[in-house]
Amino acid sequence: MGATSGTRTQRGAKRRWTELGLLYLGMGVSGGEEGARNGPSLMPGGSYEAYKYIEDILLKVAAQVPDSGPCVTYIGKGGSGNFVKMVHNGIEYGDMQLIAEAYDVLKSVGKLTNDELQHVFSEWNKGELLSFLIEITADIFGVKDDKGDGHLVDKVLDKTGMKGTGKWTVQQAAELSVAAPTIAASLDSRFLSGLKEERVEAAKVFQSGGFSDVFESKPVDKAKLIDDVRQALYASKICSYAQGMNLIRTKSTEKGWDLKLGELSRIWKGGCIIRAIFLDRIKKAYDRNPELSNLLVDPEFAKEILDRQSAWRRVVCLAINHGISTPGMSTSLAYFDTYRRERVPANLVQAQRDYFGAHTYERVDMPGSFHTEWFKIAKQSKI
């Protein structure tokens, strides 16, 4: 059961069961088929007493990671286990979207074949991007079509399904006023992918108007492009995870759950869909500073983003110039560029709000709340 609608059901069930003297434990589970066979990542939340009754079982059932232990821990009170699982899925949406964009740029701009893509992703899976999703992506590019010629991935309809957890994550982010643009972009991309028939007709309209998917450009240095896309993918991934962890932290504060973000990173290192070597770096970041406001300002992650930002910008600009949509990478870059700026143009937006709705504003040079008769002053200045 995923979180927002699930937690409402939990509250009612918990009250009924508590009256009967029963202990309630809700648990998020991630791992798919492989997790079912070899051990999933388990996220139990609710009654700590109930958790202790079955802890020995969960420790054995969960995925086991060398040097990190079983991928299970007591998450916290109430519906925290299911909430954490929901956000895990939101992060998963973002991860998959970013990987798909990396594939699109390499295929559409770099003209890489499926065999070359398989090699690239296999190599990426030996370094900083080592993860379950990169691993299976490499595998996908190597599968031939058993019902025809060529590779199976090219025969798969470009229409993505969903079960709701990504949508719930974005809804919760909005309710908590937490920016999660990468996750939201991945959700929007799934919505747009569902408009297959409309997209087919739209392509005809723009092609008849002279627009082509094939842009005239200089030959691309494949090796350089591959390295740039790798760096852009990694930098975007940092932003996506930062958004997910901020959402969990904010909900934890609201509910008084006292969730340990470093420990969540640890139990995601095995069994679950987003398991990756990258998570060990996140755990160390929160070990260094449990009160870390954002992964972007952790010294190590900040340096990694700075080292990769030039490649990141090149990839986004290249995609735009070739008419290729990279909403995940683009919005991750926008998130970084907004977060790192001391002053953003929100002052103008607030002035507009005060102009048409008398919503008031604060000043940078003195305390208090202010309202200005913008219309009257503007008219007087024109006389």
Image (tube, rainbow, N blue to C red):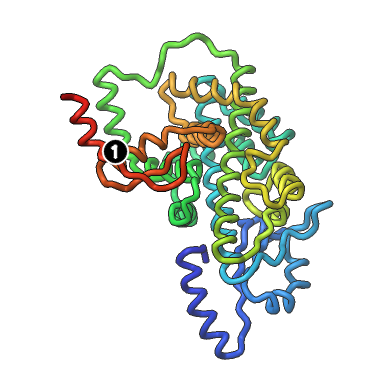
Left or right of 267 in this view: 213: left
Left or right of 383 in this view: 114: right
In this orientation, does residue 12 appear?
A: yes
Left or right of 95 in this view: 202: left
Q: Point out residue 271 in the picture as x, y percentages from the top left corner.
A: 69, 55
Q: Point out residue 376 in the picture as x, y percentages from the top left corner.
A: 20, 36
Q: Amino acid at mark 1?
A: Glu
Q: Point out residue 217 in the picture as x, y percentages from the top left corner.
A: 46, 11
In this orientation, does residue 115 appear?
A: no
Q: Residues within 10 Å of mark 1 (few under 14, many from 20)?
A: few
Left or right of 17 in this view: 157: left
Hey, which residue is sitting farthest bottom in the picture? Answer: 20
| Residue 239 in which image quadrant | top right
Hey, which residue is sitting farthest top in the picture? Answer: 218
**Residue position marked by numbered label 1 in the rendering:** 198
The count of marks equals 1
Q: In the image, what residue occupies the spot 32% across and 35% down? A: 199
Secondary structure, mark 1, is helix
Q: In the image, what residue occupies the spot 60% across and 21% down? A: 310
Placement of 270 over or under 198, stated as above or below: below
Q: Nearer the viewer, residue 350 or 368?
A: 368
Q: Point out residue 75 in the picture as x, y percentages from the top left corner.
A: 66, 65
Image quadrant containing the C terminus: top left
Q: Nearer the viewer, residue 1 or 265?
A: 265
Hey, which residue is sitting farthest left in the picture? Answer: 383
